[in-house]
Amino acid sequence: MVIPKGKVIHEDLSTSYTDIDELLRDLRQNSFTGYCQVNFWEYRGTLFLDRGRIINAFEEAGSAHTIGDRAIRSILAKAKQKDGTVSVFQLQDEMVATLASVLNSKVKYRDLTTELTSLEKLISKLKKEEHSGYVEVLLNGDNGDGCIYFQDGRAMESVFRAVDGEMISGPSGFKKILGLSTEVGAVFNVFESDLSSIVVDSSVSDEVIQLFQNTLNVLEESVDAKLGTGKFADEFKRRLAINANKYLFLDPFAGEFVYKEKTLSFEGEDTTLEDFTIGVCDVISQTVEHFKQKDETLLDAICSGIQPLKEDRMQLIDRLKLDMKMPSVFGDRVVAESAPKEGEEKESKGGRLSRLFKRKKSSEEA
């Protein structure tokens, strides 16, 4: 699959000096739509973002290909290694959705040749079928290859890639593919989008369990510090029992979901990630609301305590939409701040983005 380049936002930033978490945080705040690509020798990882949220990913390591949650985790880890590059390209919303959906695409027609049909006839057929996906064009000889992307029968983008790696997109790319397929011949493979692939791994992973455990730890420490040891655990258990009929996996007698001595364990094999997240967020929100009525300053304490976790696990929190499902914990909260000291300035967008390079530089200069 040849990905259209789009508008260059950042190109070939060194991974040695770029903080990938800070970069993605900035893209999220700016509701960026496009993709972030991480490159090393014989490695390429692509994160697709829709309004700042990662909706899918594609990792190529040698001949091995990975998509979805596993790819996201691996790419983020790889981007923290030295001697690679990071680039960011902006695309239209529809194009990103199409690219994200074709990562796990199904073959619709394979090995069609120009001896049997022309590219023009194939495009006409796909238009009538309101096809969503892409056509891979493998040109005969050493003449390169290309992709034509479709959304509901409409050709949205074309990308031609020459043997030397040079790429031509848009109308010029389409004209090049069309002309060469007629001149030298080609093989066409048609792939149909799988829209469900945008929804990444639906299982409750160890990473998710760890995030909720850390969240419960912060809440327990914040509540107990203000209202007394054991108060949070007792109320949380009570709320689990109250909601057991609504969320069966939370039933204390079933033993699937257990939070004890600051450790969370979960053994609900039939529970989806969405059901798990909604249920646990609901119970936590009820618990926090109960204590908020006893101490109005509690939310400020929670906000301060949860901030390091928000920064460290931003991508997972974002993917699970915890800011919307649990606003009392992960939502944005305005806390009164002291006036800036003389000579200090508030951080602008540009100043914030410059922090991408500060942390790694300082660690290497030390």
Image (tube, helix red, strand yellow):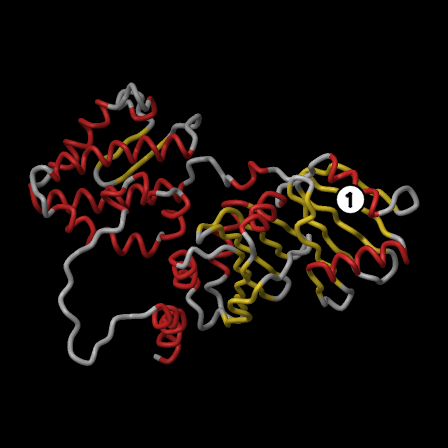
Residue at label 1? 123
Q: Residue furthest right?
A: 115
- Image point 21% across, 22% down: which residue? 242
Q: Which quarter of the figure has residue 5?
A: bottom right
Q: Where is residue 202? Give x, y as percent.
A: 47, 35
Q: Where is residue 341? Give x, y as percent.
A: 15, 75
- Image point 23% across, 43% down: which residue? 328
Q: Is residue 229 left or right of residue 135?
A: left
Which image quarter holds the C terminus? bottom left
Residue neighbourhood size for the residue with mark 1, other residues' Cα within 10 Å, grouped as few (<14), some (14–19), many (≥20): some
Please state which amino acid type lies under the numbered disc 1.
Ile
- Image point 57% across, 47% down: which residue? 100
Q: Secondary structure at mark 1?
A: helix
**Front one among 148 and 259:** 148
Q: Which quarter of the figure has residue 121?
A: top right
327 w.r.t. 1: above or below:
above
Q: Is residue 103 left or right of residue 218?
A: right
Q: Where is residue 40? Give x, y as percent.
A: 58, 65
Q: Where is residue 61? Give x, y as percent.
A: 62, 56
**Front one among 220 and 316:** 316
62 w.r.t. 330: above or below:
below
- Image point 87% across, 56% down: which residue? 140
Total numbered circles: 1
Q: Is residue 350 left or right of residue 41?
A: left
115 w.r.t. 139: above or below:
above
